[in-house]
């Protein structure tokens, strides 16, 4: 009877570990998961979303922004972050208009 209990404990530990792995599994896509050939589709999707909110930006501009964003993310982190007080369009960094 004791051998059966050890076997049951082992199976329980393996199943428990599997359940924990599935629960903690991160299914979100990362920058490195998105291929370059997917860029036009991503730009079109973003353009459609922006048009729905009343903003119109062409897909070529969005694709360029995505390429620059990927280049930025590929760089090493900066040694020191400076503060951004005012944005070029007159808004403050906290999102409020000046």
Image: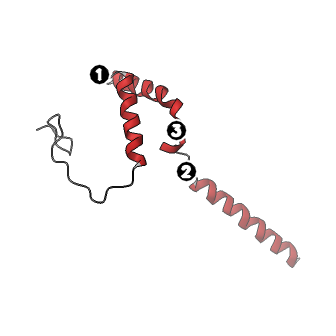
Q: Callout 3: helix, strand or loop?
A: loop
Residue 44 image-quadrant placement: top left
Label 1 Cα neighbours within 10 Å, binned few <14 / some 14-19 / many ≥20: few
| Crowd rating for badge 3 (residues with CA inside 10 Å; few <14, some 14–19, many 20+) | few
Q: Earlier in the sequence, mark 2 or mark 3?
A: 2
Q: Position of residue 85 (x, y in %)?
A: 16, 47
- Which quadrant: the C terminus? top left
Give the number of the disc on residue 26.
Answer: 2
Give the spatial CA distance, label 1 vs label 3: 27 Å
Q: CA distance from mark 2 to mark 1?
A: 33 Å
Q: Residue at 22% x, 54% y: name it.
A: 82
Residue 9: where, in percent of width, then height? 76, 71
The reply, left or right, for residue 26 in relation to residue 76 is right
> Which residue has dot 1 on it?
54
Residue 32 in the figure: left or right of residue 8: left
What residue did someone put label 3 on? 34
């Amino acid at each position: 009877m004791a051998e059966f209990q050890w076997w049951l404990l082992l199976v329980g530990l393996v199943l428990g570990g599997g359940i924990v792995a599935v629960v903690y599994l991160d299914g979100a896509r990362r920058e490195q998961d998105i291929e370059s050939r997917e860029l036009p589709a991503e730009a079109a999707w973003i353009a459609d979303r922006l048009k729905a909110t009343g903003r119109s930006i062409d897909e070529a501009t969005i694709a360029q922004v995505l390429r620059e964003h990927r280049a930025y993310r590929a760089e090493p982190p900066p040694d020191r972050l400076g503060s951004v007080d005012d944005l070029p369009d007159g808004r403050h960094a906290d999102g409020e208009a000046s």
